[in-house]
Amino acid sequence: MVKTWSVSYPGVSGRQQRRVFLYLPRMYYRDRDRRFPVLYMFDGQNIFFDEEASFGKSWGMGEYLDKHRVPIIVAAIECNNGDNDERMLEYSPYEYDEPELGHLYGCGDDTFAWIIERFKPFIDKHFRTMGDRDHTFIGGSSMGGLMALYGLLNYNEIFSRAAALSPSLWVAPEQLMELAAEAPLDENTVLYMDYGTLEEGTESNMFDLFSAMGAHLLNCGIDITLRIVPNGEHTEACWERQLPFVFHTLMYNVY
């Protein structure tokens, strides 16, 4: 079951209403004493329903989780789809230059401050979560994938596991590698990360960057599932097909 409501969100263009999409597994209602790990997701409008998705196709995550009886809560917050690159700002922890958009000032830490200080406490208070670090995960794709990776590294005391699908590593690869090397990572830190062979940028240096980042993260002590997706594209339909790999990694040895 997916519950939906609106929250007041302090976005870069001012306080605004954002939708929350919260998945509760069927067993949540059958076993009233059981608590569940939580996966926090970016781009919430794209996770569950095709009719809500930005490009008409979602990840179909609810159907997958129901079919495979995955014992997890998913809390997904809608992104900013404004015309002034607000999503790019809210989903980047670093300043960077984008050829078509110019110089962008990242507000990713402000986004995480809201998730950690407001959103997570609300979810933990109102739903039967396992709110400790070992059972708190973060995930996303593209810029959301970048944020998931950054969250795992910079807020490792909050998030123990992450799924970064097609992460926008090009934004700040040197800063990410430096952060991974210096961050005080818990030994129980797990990451799923992938990239598709048909994604934009694969004809240049994206595979080199992806493999270098994966090797670096592995050397930093992260337990990582690293995948190059054959014929993988930068689309929700492709990310949906990776869900078996994502949840095999995130849920491994959780209980």
Image (tube, grey):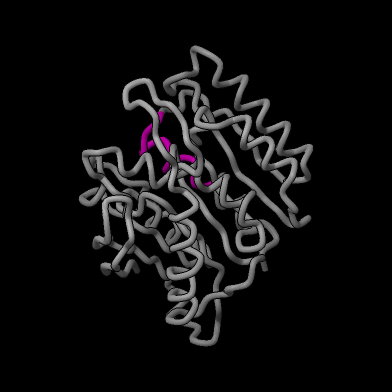
* Left or right relative to 236: residue 37: right
Residue 133: give x, y in percent of width and height: 64, 66
Q: Residue at x 58, y 74 (%)?
A: 130
Residue at position x 65%, y 57% in the image: 156
Residue positioned most to the top: 203
Q: Quadrant of residue 157?
A: bottom right
Q: Residue at x 32, y 55 (%)?
A: 11
In the picture, measured across the screen, residue 45 lies left or right of residue 164, that is left
Residue 100 in the image: state x and y as whole percent: 32, 22
Q: Quadrant of the C terminus?
A: bottom right
- In the orientation shown, which residue stands out farthest toward the bottom? 33
Q: Measured from the top left, where is residue 158 in percent x and y?
A: 61, 63
Percent x, y of residue 83: 21, 39
The correct choice, above or below, for 8 with respect to 31 in the image is: above
Q: Is residue 55 above or below residue 35?
A: above
Judge whether residue 240 is colored magenta. yes
Main SS of the magenta segment? helix
Total count of labels: 0
Nearest the viewer among 52 and 146 is 146
- Classify residue 29 as left or right of residue 249: left
Question: Which quadrant of the figure contains the N terminus?
Answer: bottom left
| Residue stretch in magenta | 234-244
For residue 99, above or below residue 215: above
Pick whichever, 100 or 187, lies toward us: 100
Q: Residue at x 44, y 39 (%)?
A: 143
Residue 95 or 146: which is nearer the viewer?
Answer: 95
Residue 7 lies in the magenta stretch: no
